[in-house]
Amino acid sequence: MAQNPASKQLPPPAAGGVVLVVAVRAGLGDQADNANTDAVRAELDQLPGGRVLVGGYPVIDRELGATAESDLVDAEGIALPIVLILLGLALRTVFGTLLGLALVATTVTGALAILLALSTVADVSSFAINVVTMFGMGLAVDYGLLLLTRFRRERAAGIDVRTAVAVTMATAGRTVAFSGLTVAVALAGLLVFSEPIMRSMAYGGIGAVGVAVASALTLLPVLLRRVGHRIPPAPQPPARGGFTALARLVQHRPVLVTAAALATLTLLALPLGGLHLEGLDARALPGDSTARIHTRQLEQQLPTLARTPITIAATITPTDARLAGYLDQLRRLDHVATATPRTGTTGGLTIVDVTVDGPPAGRDAMNLVDTLRGIEPGFDTKVGGLAARDRDFITSLLRRSPYAAVLIAVLTFLVLLTVTGGVLVAAKAVAMNVASLAASLGALVWIFQDGHLAAPLGVTPTGGLELIIVVLAAVFAFGLSTDYEVFLLSAVMAARHDGADTDTAVAAGIQRTGRTITTAAVLLIVVFTGFAAGDLLIIKQLGIGLAIAVGIDATLVRLALTPALMTLLRERNWTGPHWATRTSHALWHHEQRHTATPSAAPSAAPTG
C-alpha cells in the first residue's frame, strides 16, 4: 500500500461494513503525497466483497489537482479556437491570425517553463498552471492585436514593411512595454504574502507578462519582417466616428455621467459588504466528482468518523480530572458535533478531535477555531487540523493584504505619473481601477456566494468565497484594468502632444483605440469564460470574476467615467512634478518623430 502507512480498524457503521483509517507519514512532498494517495485508492478499489468509499482530505486534494489539469486541457480546447476565429475576423488576414497564435503559444509555453523551473526549488500550486495559462493567453492576445493593428495602419500610409515594423515597435511597442510594466507591478504585490501558493502565482504571472512582452517586442517584429507583405493594410480610423460621438456626448454632461457611472459601480459593489471567507474542501469539486460523492456518502453514513476534525493537543494526561470538564465545555459550543479524546496518547498529552456539524473548511468551522483558541482551560492547548490551517491562511493573507494593496497602488501611480506627467490623471486611473475592481468582486459575491446564476453556471453555492480567489481576482483584475488604461492614455497623450486640448485629445484617444480595445476585451472575455467553463469551482470563480472586470473596465470605465472625469479636471489632469512632465514629454515627442510618412510605393516583397 502507501509508503509507511499506519492503519487501524474502527467499529463498523450502523449499516454494516468496515471503517479503515490510513495515516500517511507527514512531511512528504507533493509528488510523494499524490503517489501515496493513488496507491491507497488503487489498493482499496481491489478489495473484494462490496463497494469501497474512499474519502479524506488527501483524496480531495489529489482530485482537485487532477481536475485542474483536466480543466486546463478543456479550457484551451474551448477558448483557443474561438479566439483564433475572432482574431481572424478582427484582423481579416490569415497570416496575422497565425502571428497572433505564435505569440499565444510562445507566451504560454514560456510561462509554463518558468513554473516548471520554479517547481524544482519551491512548491507550486496546481492551480497556478491554470491561472498563469489563462492570464498569459489573454495578454498575448492583447499585445498581438495592438501591434498587428498598428502595423496594418502604418502599411496603409504607403511605407515599406521594414519601416512599418520599425515605426510599430517605436510607438505601439513602447505602449506594450509600459503596459507590461504596470501589469507586472500589480502582480508584484503578491510577493508581499509569505504563503508559497501566492508567491508561485506571482512568479508565474510576472513570468507570463515578461514572456508576453518579450515575444511581442522580439519574435513578432522578426515574423512581421518576413511575412508582413502578406498582411493587408488597414486604414487609420476616421478622425470622427461612433466613439468620438459617444465621448462628446459624455463630455457634454460630465457631472451627470460621473454620478450615474459611480452609482452603477456602487450598486455592483454592494454585495461585497456581505463577503464571507471560507477554506477549500470537497465542495470545490464538481458534483459528479468521485471524491465529492464519496465524501458526501461517508458523511451521511458516518457523521462523526468521516468528518475532518479540528485537532486539539492539550498538555494534560487522559486521567486528569480537568479533562472531563474541558470536554463538556467543548461539547456545549455551537456547531460542535463531537469532542472525543484519542486513546493511546503518551508523553503527558491528550489529543482531542472536535468535529463540526458542517463543512470542515466552512465559515462555522473556522469561527469555531477562533473560539477554541480563546478558551483558557488551565493548561496549554494547541489547535490544528484543516479548519485551523485555513483560518491561519486567511488570517495571514488579511494581515498582509493592506501592505500589498498600498504597494500596488503606489507603484502603479508612479508608472502612470511617468507616462502622463500628471498627478491627477494618474490618481484618477488608480481610483477608477479600484472602483472597477470592487464592482467585479461584488458581482462575484452575488453570483457564487449568494447563489444567483448558480444554476446556469452549474455550481452549488457554498455560502462564501475562498480568500485566495478574492486576492487573485483583485490583483489580476487591477493589472488588466491598468493595461487598458495605458492603451487609452497612450493615444490621448499622442493627440495632446500634437496640440489638441484635453477634451479633443480624450475624444481622439477613445476614437483611435475604440475598436482595438473593444476587440481585445471581447477576446479576453472569451479566454476567461473558456476557463470558467471547467469543473473546478475556484477556477470558474476566477474566470468569471476577470471576465466581469474586463467587461466593466472596457465599457463603463473607459467610455463613461474616464472621459467624464478628465473633462471635469481639464488641464489640471496634466499638472505634476517637473521630472514627470519632462519624462512624459520626451516619451510622446518620441512618438511624433516616428509617425509614419508615405513613401512613393509600399514594399511588395518581404524585407529583412
Image (cartoon, rainbow, N blue to C red):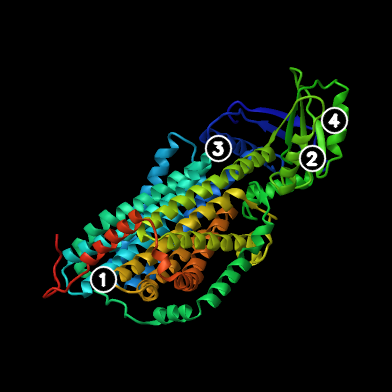
Nearer to the camera, 297 or 451: 451
Q: Which amino acid does label 3 sit on?
A: Asn
Q: Are marks 2 and 1 in contact (CB under 8 Å)?
A: no
The total number of labels drawn is 4
Please state which of the two labelled residues, at mark 4 or mark 3, is closer to the viewer: 4
> Is residue 566 shown to the viewer in this render?
yes
Q: How far is disc 2 from disc 1 in space, using C-alphas?
A: 67 Å
Whole-percent x and y of residue 270? 65, 63
> Is residue 108 shown to the viewer in this render?
no
Q: What residue type is labelled 4?
A: Tyr
Question: What residue is shown with label 4?
Answer: 326
Quadrant (top left/top right/bottom left/bottom right) for the C terminus: bottom left
Q: How far is disc 1 from disc 4 in space, using C-alphas?
A: 76 Å
Nearer to the camera, 193 or 414: 414
Q: Residue at x 47, y 65 (%)?
A: 526
Whole-percent x and y of residue 467? 61, 49
Circle 1 — which element?
A: helix
Q: How far is disc 3 from disc 1 in space, using C-alphas?
A: 51 Å
